[in-house]
Image: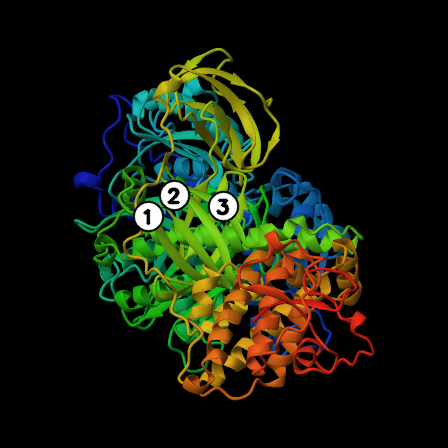
Amino acid sequence: MARLSIALALLATAHAFTGPLAPRAPHKNALVAPQQKGVRNWLTKLKAAVADPAPVAAETKQDRLAEYVAAKGGTRVIRRVLIANNGMAATKSIMSMRRWAYLELGDERALEFIVMATPEDLNANAEFVRLADEYVEVPGGSNTNNYANVKLIVDTASRLGVDAVWPGWGHASENPKLPRALKEKGIAFMGPPAPVMSVLGDKIAANILAQTAKVPSIPWSGSFGNPGDDGPLQANLQEDGTIPRETFEAGCVHSAEEALAAAERVQYPVMLKASEGGGGKGIRMCKNAEELSAAFPQVENEQPGSPIFVMQLMTGARHLEVQVVGDEHGNAVALNGRDCSTQRRFQKIFEEAPPTKPSGGIARPDVFADMELKAKQLVQNIGYVGAGTVEYLYNAANDDYFFLELNPRLQVEHPCTEGITDINMPATQLQVAMGIPLHRIPHIRRFYGLEDVHGSSTIDFHEVRYPKITKHVIAARITAENPDEGFKPTSGSIERVKFQSTRNVWGYFSVGANGGIHEFADSQFGHIFASGATREIARRHLVLALKSVEIRGKIRNPVEYLVELLETDAFKANDIHTGWLDGILRAKSIAVPTNTPRLVLAAVLYRSHQFVKSKREELEASLAKGQLSTVLVKDLTAFSQTITYEGLKYDFLVQKSGPEVFSLRLNDQSITAKVREQPDGSLLCAFGGATRKVHGLEEPLGLRIICDGVTCLMPTIFDPSELRTDVTGKVVRYLQEDGTHLDAGAPYVEVEAMKMIMALKTGEAGKFNHLKPPGSIISAGDLLAKLELSDPSKVAKVEPYQGAFDDILDIVEEDETAADKCALLLDGFERGDPTTLAKDLTDDNVNVVVDEAAQLLQRYLVVESRYAGRPMDAVVQELVAEHKEDLTKAIDVARAHSQLKQRTVLCQQILKELLQIYANRRASGVDPAPMTLVSALAQLAALPGDAYGDLALLALRVSLVANDEAPTPRTLDTRLFDKASLTRGYALIELETGSAAATAFLGNLSVETPSKLTKPGRGGEPPALFLFF
């Protein structure tokens, strides 16, 4: 008891807060010196209230767990643990305790974990459900229905016969009703006793307790109102160790009006805080009365039922904390601490350990040792059991510190402590809950440098210092938030999380592939840690780790932005404070570097690839149903795409110029790119002289594209009179009445998303009318309200882009030959002028050209021999039957035929080139026509139908010249031909069966009578051929 008085007195006198960080004096008469009367009285009551009943005897069953507990002086065996939490907390706890069980006992299944899971968690494929031995489905929706529902937790624990409940952080972890109810059921609570939690776990009660013990307190709504003197409220504890209700209520503000009155006394700026809040929820900074009035209902809605208080905001401070653990035997240890000064909206984003110099921390080692000592004294003398965190505000300018609060639970950032101490914190909670003294826990003995880690010698944690810590750890929280919108929370599916641990980097994720973050979940789903000999080395490791992280899905994440923060001069120099990041966000002084041409091209390539893919799938589905129309084939090779970005509209003409190649036309600029889809759905896009990995996702508000690790939104163009939400959640309340005229940027509605309340603002000025009622469930892109615009002419318009992308190469590097390009055109792709392509078929060896030409003509015939002279539906029906297992092959044939005109022009030019070669055979040195060419020419000449007439005649002419035939016409028959329609230089001759000309025409076909010959391009019986000679 005396030691507690000493500890609190030390806290009261240690390092008075002075200088620019010192709290400003409140309004006169707001603070008076705290009374000493009653201090010893409430300490006595608190000690009595937390005294435990007789310890539970360890089980006698001879198993490794029971043997371990008995050997370490424990009082109970815990085998079955109910995890009364979800997300990161549940995931990390199970992983850590299983790891301990295997490394210490050789059996990771020595412990059984039962988890509570809502329908939303189950549908999101939550990782903690997979890790558990059993799960119990609990009601969904707000956490008051599940993880914060004390009765549900206690009933579930009792029904399932668990030995203990692990509360984690958030939810019910700081509700003293939970340990009290579990104690009545004989179930262990892996945290502090209810009375201790009541007076220290609640922020209001903790402040009353601190100022009663003369601990300097920041001016707050309990700094006045004490009966008799209107001074700071005093903690005259009741028999159960709790603060009287009337005293507690006097420190609260129950309405916006009471909050405004309290703020006038403590002075602005202030923080409006829910005592049960945490993690940035239930807390708002307010610079004036207007902001405070708007913030009160937001805090109420974020933490329903929580008491609320007002506290003066201290600026420029560092947030340092000490990790403490107490056991039921009266021991307490401080396991170093952390620096959590990088925060936005009072929610931590980076954490570091240790917070001391010389590894790169901010605090002087001797000053931080004093902070640790007072933290140990505080928790030991009030009978604290379990893991907790004593938080301080620290003035780096003069090394002053100031007690802030004690969190009676494990914190999210506890792996930082694990990283520098090698102490498994959840496993330590477990062992403390099993009654094992702190000095008997092997991890703690090892941290204190004892060789006999399994020994039983005591450790005076107040006098003995642990060895110097020789490394630094920095952590980054991975959240489902949009840094472009001030870290606004998002929700949705997660397709992929790619993260690779190394010797210096590790991490935890609460979701896996095909998982998700639902609207009732905490926004954090990952935590990445990096260590090094110094802070700078750890920072560099973390930067590299974050750059390699890949997260795909409908959520946004701040990974790219975190890298930019880590690379700032201020962070490198550790010249930051708790308001540093919020200042950056307000000023928008940091942004992820972007390359507009690169992002726009990535977007148009993604949309073009998806467009072609969807059209093919649509066509396949149609053919599979027996619908024989192939009209959609034309959309596979040429179409337009429009990308909107930063107020400009980019209109592209897109052509498919190969299986993986797109040709883009923007104004007068042509850009060629190669696109290949990977098994994970990402695209490898080669353009601008490099290959880039591209991810895309169409959202209600536009296309979210990720290129080279940079994320941006290519917005859909909406009517500015439409007010749409960019988050998924629920409408809480409208801030404006229908018919009200609003200025641009005015808040008009509050929505709840990811347990946060936020206001949405108008983009233009106009008369307001809401469409969806309060309470409506909403998704991103939903229309919430309409504006009758005040001046439509002033609305910013999206202008067409008129320039060119100067830093993008015109073509992709590739090794295509002229024959390759001709082949692609014959396959139905857009490859430019076919006449030019055919003329490019050159080689030093003319016979190579002939061979290539023969192959290209055969490629043409593979398709057209199906279609010539036949009904289209019959051909398509045949293709579908032939390729029913892979309709893409049928579509490829149809696509090629859809480009008949271009393909025919190409073949005609090829034939003309061959004609020149064979007409000058002596000069060219060409060999006799190969059979592949002879066969191709014969088939071309025999193609029926007007579409092939000129091509067939030209093929016959080449056939005659290639075989060195010059037959003299014996009989001219002009009766069946309109001479006016004949091309100049053509004549009619009769071919005799068996002649060289007839053989060239027919190939190896033998005919008995001339009447079986067919005139190319026409039908008919007479044995006459239309040819040039």
Q: Position of residue 680 (x, y in %)?
A: 56, 64
For label 2, the residue is 484
Q: Position of residue 906 (x, y in %)?
A: 52, 64
The residue shown at (59%, 85%) is 930
Give the amino acid type for the residue marked by disc 1 in the picture: Tyr
- Circle nearer the viewer, 2 or 1: 2
Check residue 392 in the rendering and tell me which mark sits there, or answer none.
1
Q: Judge left or right: residue 95 versus residue 28.
A: right
Residue 539 figure quarter: bottom left
Q: Judge left or right: residue 621 versus residue 782.
A: right
Task: Please name whichever residue, 29 or 172, is drawn nearer the observer in this view of the structure.
Answer: 172
The residue shown at (47%, 54%) is 605
Mark 1 vs mark 3, CA separation in Å: 60 Å
The residue shown at (66%, 46%) is 120
For label 3, the residue is 640
Give the amino acid type for the residue marked by disc 2 in the picture: Asp
Q: Residue furthest right?
A: 1008
